[in-house]
Image: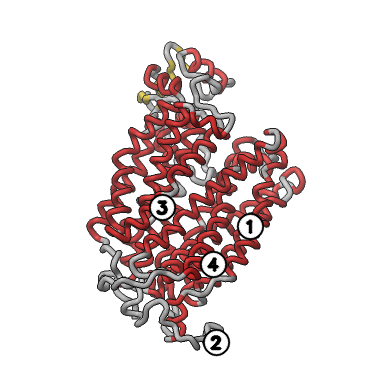
Amino acid sequence: MGVSATQAGPATPSAAPMTADEKKIILASSLGTVFEWYDFYLYGSLAVVIAGNFFGQFDETTRNIFALLAFAAGFLVRPFGAVVFGQMGDRVGRKYTFLITILLMGSATFLVGIVPTSDTIGFSAAVILIILRIVQGLAIGGEYGGAATYVAEHAPPGRRGFYTSWIQTTATLGLFLSLLVILTTQSFMSAADFRAWGWRVPFLISIILLPISVWIRLRLSESPAFLRMVAENARSRSPLHEAFFQWAHAKWAILALFGLVAGQAVVWYCGQFYALFFLTSVLKVDSFTGNLLVAWGLALGTGGFILFGWLSDKIGRKPVILGGCMLAALTYFPVFQYMADTANPALAAAQQAVKVVVVADPADCSFQFNPTGLTRFGRSCDAAKGALSRASVLYAQEDAPPGTPASIRIGDKTLDPAASGFARDLTAALTAVGYPEAANASVVKLAHPWDIFRPQPLTLVVILGYLVLLVTMVYGPIAAALVELFPTRIRYTSMSLPYHIGNGWFGGLLPATVFAMNAQSGSIYFGLWYPVAVAAGTAIVGLLFLPETRDRDIFEGDLAYRPGDIPLDFDPNAADY
């Protein structure tokens, strides 16, 4: 029978340290997960280049729609992967389940590198790409719960936060590795060659990583908790039903989502993905420079995962995770404003000095939330706001009489969004009043990795390092906190779904939500209210309703043993296993 999440087992006496073999198991598990995240992030980093190759037969608008749809697919299906593989992990085993996930991920990634482009096979290229992205999302949905559960169930009491924090580094290290491979590949060829065929190299390299990852995982032993559960015939017959349709367990999944994972997700995506988007799309920093700055920021802050995982073993999971959420909520606005002032001071000055007004019928304006890119915003107000948001222009809205077509007032000029040549006229009008051109000299630009030691880029690396440090606070202890909330028989299933709903939806939809809020308000900062509100709400819910789990015995109540107590004659390959 599962232990209630409200019951905290007594603090475990000092446990023997992990053996060298057990540490190798933890390291091997972490390395395999790094490769899996590397595969997943490649598409996000190369989405624009891939769109030109797989959706090239379409016009630019439709091409971008399909690119966004393929990108979103990988996030939106993650909870479904969590359900499928979570049940498998609780019934078949942790080791074999995440062996399957890495095979799926690695194969799908390699296939992206060899699929013919739309110039060769037409629309089929787009369909195949989206299917492969769905496979990647399903595999990631099953990966994290297995790795976190497996590591936690091998870790000695009192060290779970530290040992599972190595798993937490894998997502960031996977992103770092993908950026490193992309930047290295770009440095050996021209931009035209990279767009034409060089983008395939990072995907093809994954075929080297795949057998290494599979070999590493084949050498792993099954979780001792799962083996004892099999020996005692204590497996759940229906992990999904028990985890989410029995209120005693389901309520903790809900609280885990809103009291831990939602805040962790928005801080994680804001500090890594949105920071890069903000640099390149909002502040107009070139892609190479933006990727390089983020890579340096990741290098500066990544050690925080281990630090805060260790600290959570000393002071508790809640103070670290919820403290990171509150720090993010309190500092995001000044930090992103400082980033803008540093990365593109000419743009920041123009935003403050130039008054731009959208004059429109309020009924003509939509909230431009478009996570899949499938929605068309064809009204004149939407066209005006969308164009200004993409140009990073701060603007105010002035209501016009019903039925009045929207217009944009910049200084003494009035522009019609529906007019021929609107994009050209908008650029000229903004430049005339002080908005800098895309290649203005004040924007940060790096030609080599060592260029970061100049004052402007070094300041940005420190800013990005701080954002990554917040990520490590909320993410470092999260695996231990989730594992400790649920009983062994349904642990893989129970923790996987809230984790992937939080990270796949709350986090994965963050860029689209922030853009829509910015376009609605006329500010490049207003959308930050989304991560600020979610992070602050998570801190409040977690503080009031979640127990501290640091000293919980994760085996008590459903397994009467400790790691290492497995009988020497127990055979995990027996018929009943």
Q: Marks 3 and 1, how far apart in space?
A: 24 Å
Nearer to me, 75 or 455: 455
Residue kind at label 1, given as amino acid type: Leu
Say which label, 3 or 4, has the lower sequence index. 4
Say which label, 3 or 1, has the lower sequence index. 1
Mark on residue 574? 2
Nearer to me, 565 or 338: 565
557 relative to 25, above or below: below
Q: Marks 1 and 4, how far apart in space?
A: 15 Å
Q: Residue at x 34, y 35 (%)?
A: 333
Say which label, 1 or 2, has the lower sequence index. 1
231 relative to 65, above or below: below
In the rendered image, which residue does mark 3 sit on?
305
Quadrant hosting residue 367: top left
In the rendered image, which residue does mark 4 sit on?
98
Which structural element holds mark 4?
A: helix
Q: Which residue is drawn at 66% across and 49% down?
A: 126
249 relative to 441, above or below: below
Q: Marks 3 and 4, how far apart in space?
A: 22 Å
Furthest residue in direction top, as rendered: 412
